[in-house]
Amino acid sequence: MAAHLSYGRVNLNVLREAVRRELREFLDKCAGSKAIVWDEYLTGPFGLIAQYSLLKEHEVEKMFTLKGSRLPAADVKNIIFFVRPRLELMDVIAENVLSEDRRGPARDFHILFVPRRSLLCEQRLKDLGVLGSFIHREEYSLDLIPFDGDLLSMESEGAFKECYLEGDQTSLYHAAKGLMTLQALYGTIPQIFGKGECARQVANMMIRMKREFTGSQNSIFPVFDNLLLLDRNVDLLTPLATQLTYEGLIDEIYGIQNSYVKLPPEKFAPKKQGDGGKDLPTEAKKLQLNSAEELYAEIRDKNFNAVGSVLSKKAKIISAAFEERHNAKTVGEIKQFVSQLPHMQAARGSLANHTSIAELIKDVTTSEDFFDKLTVEQEFMSGIDTDKVNNYIEDCIAQKHPLIKVLRLVCLQSVCNSGLKQKVLDYYKREILQTYGYEHILTLSNLEKAGLLRPQTGGRNNYPTIRKTLRLWMDDVNEQNPTDISYVYSGYAPLSVRLAQLLSRPGWRSIEEVLRILPGPHFEERQPLPTGLQKKRQPGENRVTLIFFLGGVTFAEIAALRFLSQLEDGGTEYVIATTKLMNGSSWIEALMERPS
């Protein structure tokens, strides 16, 4: 059991166990010793549901990364390919199978598609003459992966681009399937709310799937009261701004992948006396970040400016606890101290790690450039000078700052102005292409299609109306003891989370005008429950809302939702699901066209 998955109102270990069981059943079908050949992208997500020990129990002896030519030698009976259904991967698998040494002992091949089998892929394997080599061809529906006690992700990196640029609904189908799995485990969700075109499609798919399964009545008492489906393109602004929570900044600066972060090692080297730092480690320090670590759970969602004081308080408490050993006189007292030692040492190690991370982040956040960039972002979000060429952006282009940084700022300005005036847009495009190269014309075209960087149509800027009605900009933010979600961006309240907050109280009827301005339809569906399963809420009991971000979510938005869940009189606790955990840079990177 993973303890950090069961601390919330919804025990996500139930989901983890269900997917582990399905994996074990598949492995047992391939009797005898096994080697797994991994599609490299899947190793991270799989690590969150099944450690090597589980695979070993089911006779997995070797693991390889999928690459061309021959497979490495392995004295096993079964070779299992774990892959996403992608045509280019089928070519590599065919190469592996065809180059198998006929003289050696015959090995059985199997293929497991994650999360769905694909006719196109099977046809490609057939065309390459290897389809018949596979004894088991199955799918493993790993749609939603539990990351934490209130967080699920599909980790589908191409979902936003597929949905909004290519009109490909595959990831929406997977989202709907994932939601059906959740309902099978946690009961039917009585009310569905949604905003956006993709949200509408996912809701329709769910309703259709439910109709097709009419035979089996779900008799599980519902855990969730509501589902809120939100399109990412309803709120294009939030991911573009720099996140200012502790976890958000770790992700912005170092990137968190499948709950792990890699950090520069020199900050974590044990300081030895008198060796003058000769042998500094060169391997990146890899740390897992989730709520299983007590200190991280406490500070992850705080504004970074409030983290220092927590760390120094913790340091005092820990050193006082270690001092207690001098007061332990009797055998009983010494025994008690020794029994607490492992926990205290873990707390001290955790504090040392987070102090080092905080120092690394502080080096960035106290730099002049970080301050200048933040100032420009905050001016745009509060509606200052969004309609003309910005000097700071001009300077960044002239000094050839990283292209992603420039694109984030230009897109932020465009979104905060409901599109840029044609001459401002043309100027930016010309400057970017001349400085960074004309191959980026395709990237600019993608950003325009996604609605991130576009000309203003109808000559009207709707952003001020949205900002005022939804109170997206708050001037007096208390970063230490926040009273509003805007603390996660030191002034800007994430639009997506504000929509969730207003839905819970007083309801979306109060903001009809803004909902009409934002893209896509808004809707409400009810799913009838069998008699006896209707929930009677106790006085003071919170509703549980599952909020699903189609197209990705940032750690700052997650922090804002956790803040709402913890409010004394909030009335709603949130569980968050998404197609991908992302930040502004990884989002724009996924939209960039790589010159082939």
Image: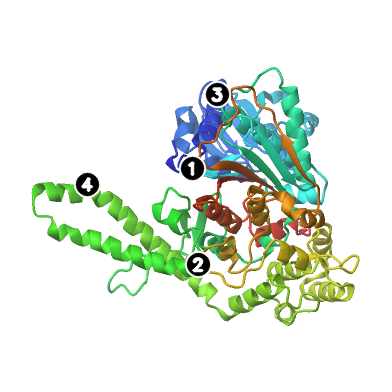
Is residue 481 shown to the viewer in this render?
yes
Q: Which residue is mark 3?
A: 25
Q: Could you tell which of marks 1 and 4 lies nearer the N-terminus?
A: 1
User: What label does residue 304 carry, if any?
Assistant: 2
Q: Could you tell which of marks 1 and 3 lies nearer the N-terminus?
A: 1
> Which mark is nearer the camera, 2 or 3?
2
Q: How is the image coloured?
A: rainbow
> Which mark is nearer the camera, 1 or 3?
1
Q: Could you tell which of marks 2 and 3 lies nearer the N-terminus?
A: 3
- Quadrant of the rendering where the C terminus is positioned: bottom right
Q: Which residue is mark 4?
A: 339
Q: Nearer the viewer, residue 351 or 501?
A: 501
Q: Residues within 10 Å of mark 2 (few under 14, many from 20)?
A: many
Q: Position of residue 139 (x, y in %)?
A: 66, 29
Q: CA distance from mark 2 to mark 3?
A: 45 Å
Q: Residues within 10 Å of mark 3 (few under 14, many from 20)?
A: few
Q: Please state if 307 lies on the left or on the right of 439 as rendered.
A: left
Q: Please state if 536 lies on the left or on the right of 167 as rendered.
A: left
Is residue 129 shown to the viewer in this render?
no
At horizontal 29% and vertical 66% (from top left) the residue drawn is 316
At horizontal 55% and vertical 40% (from top left) the residue drawn is 46
Amino acid type, mark 2 = Phe
Q: Which residue is mark 1?
A: 8
Q: Position of residue 82 (x, y in %)?
A: 62, 35
Q: CA distance from mark 4 to mark 3?
A: 40 Å
Q: Please state if 88 lies on the left or on the right of 66 as rendered.
A: right
Q: CA distance from mark 1 to mark 4?
A: 28 Å
Q: What kind of element bears circle 2? A: helix
Amino acid type, mark 1 = Gly
Q: Could you tell which of marks 2 and 4 lies nearer the N-terminus?
A: 2
> Which mark is nearer the camera, 2 or 1?
1
Q: CA distance from mark 2 to mark 4?
A: 34 Å
